[in-house]
Image (cartoon, coloured by chain):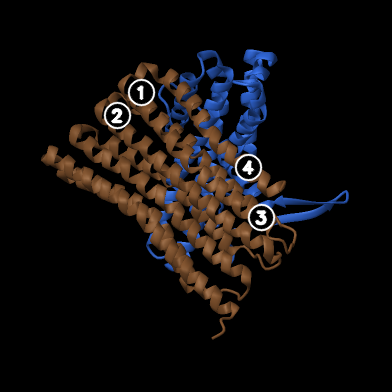
Amino acid sequence: MTIDVQTWVKVAAFTGGGLAMGLGAIGAAVGEGHTAAQANIAISRTPDMSGDIFKSMLVGQAVAESASIFALVIAMILLFTDYASSYIEISVVLSAGICMGLGAIGSGIGSGYPAGAACVGIARQPAMSGRLMTNMLIGSAVCQTPAIFSLVTSFIILFTDFSGRPINPTWAAIVGAGLASGFGGIGSGLGGGLVAETSCDGIARQPETVTPVTNVMLLGQAVTQTTAIYGLLVSFILMFKTFEATSALAPAAALLSAGICMGIGAIGPGIGEGFTARSAVDGIARNMNATAELTRIMLVGQAVAESTGIYSLVIALILIFVV
Amino acid sequence: MGELGRIHQLIFPLGGHQVSLNIEAIIMTWIVIAILLLFGYLAARKHGRVPRPMQIVGELFVAQFFGLAEDALDKKRAEKYGPLICALFMFLVLSNWLGIIPHLEEPTKDLNTPLSLGLMGFIIAHYAGIRSKGFKAYASEYFQPMFFMMPLNLIGELAKIVSISFRLFGNIMGGSIIILVVSYLTYSVVIPPLLNAFFGLFVGTIQAFVFTMLTVVYISVQVK
């Protein structure tokens, strides 16, 4: 039996679709389970508020689920689109699937946290249920950003015309681009969730701190996402730069490792900066007068934690442009 | 689906070079500017002790963002940078909302818009830093904690421009791609309006606020 290019592209598309949905299902499920668990605890504590808690659980779960819905969209497109039969398409469909699948993990888990904290918060402070819901929605929506970045990367990979480019280094660039955005989203999604969780918790404990807590939460989450943005940047460079044709394997390996380097290098800083911002938000909720000082220290601490992400970025750029 | 990620460009030769203009982003930006000018005119016209609806909205923006600037900077600097911060937010939020109107596109969907605004914030922050600390103290910060860290500190600073602009661009672009694809898959029934409300109004407002906050913080980190 001989297998032609057409068949290989189909095989890759099915594999990519499977990976997109399989990996993409992990995060949202964990996050939603956590939310439901917290909602149960909350209802056991304040059964009178069960209606509000139930509502906020469902809304929070719906937001957490959107990460895996993105993965579903990509998987559907991979399964039902006809692709040109060329070798480059194999890496295109595989990379798009892996990118979206990995990228949905962090955001899914992350946006489950604020929803859970909001449920417990409503049980503790029923009068704040409206503000808690708003804060949770903002926090969860910002958590989705890394998943949205992966989605953008997947779509651009799928719909860019790579046919005019040389096959040899380009296949590696495409796979590298997918891995950079995919892995890069895991840490930031998780970290952003931690920040949002503490902010919901803090608002429930000290309702008058709601404005600084929400502001610093947004700031902390935004800085936490920086490494995911580096991943997106490396993906963009890999996708849009035209590389010279070559028969050697070394340039391709360099492009592939640039993507892996940036992607995996972004996981740690994302989670670490999430820890920093979480404690800062917690501190502000306890002592609002120290907001300015806490924000400053948080930003400095995050910048230091981010330096390892910047090392990854430097190495990735050297791999792309110098090696 | 064919229009995904396509940019309408006007390309013309000028002195031996091909000059390309992203015509759509330019037109949409001017629409936003026109709406903002109209809003400013309506808000400031006939202002009185008993405010009219437009005046209330205008005062709300000004009070909110001056307060934000005052928290992050001090009172004197807040008066200086407050108008910039307020205008930045109003421009961004209107830009992000523009996409929910059919046939109009968000100017922030084009990377050039967030990138130039990020560059603007970066330059203003560093100018403010040099003004308040003096050039020597400003430059010596790059050699902290060790002199050989200079290149990495420099890259870290430059990466701020990338992160602030790609964050906005990625979110708005992602939202518009999702809306386009889902509209195509569902034949524009039921779901797309909800997605427009979520990505256009909700995420658009949050991201505009995040961009504004980060610009304020970049300034405040430099001046302190």
Q: Earlier in the sequence, mark 1 or mark 4?
A: 1
Gap between marks 4 and 3 measured at Cα? 19 Å
Gap between marks 2 and 1 measured at Cα? 8 Å
Name the amino acid, label 3. Phe
Looking at the image, which is closer to me, B81 or A124?
A124
**In contact (CB < 8 Å): disc 2 and disc 1:** yes
- Residue annotated with mark 3: A240
Looking at the image, which is closer to me, B49 or B160?
B160
The lab-note entry on whether marks 4 and 3 share a chain reads: yes
- Residue annotated with mark 1: A284
- Residue annotated with mark 2: A202
Q: Is residue B176 visible?
A: no
In which quarter of the view is residue A9 placed? bottom right
Name the amino acid, label 4. Ile
Q: Is residue A197 visible?
A: yes
Say which colour chain A has. brown
Category of crowding for the residue at label 3, using alpha-carbon neighbours closer than 10 angstroms: few (below 14), some (14–19), many (at least 20): some
Gap between marks 1 and 3 measured at Cα? 43 Å
- Residue A310 lies, in percent from the top left, at 58, 37
Which tag is nearer the camera, tag 4 or tag 3? 4
What's the residue at 67%, 68% (across, down)? A163
- Residue B140 lies, in percent from the top left, at 66, 17
- Residue annotated with mark 4: A315
**In contact (CB < 8 Å): disc 3 and disc 2:** no
Chain coloured blue here:
B
Q: Horizontal placement of B24 versus B176: left or right?
A: right
Q: Earlier in the sequence, mark 2 or mark 1?
A: 2
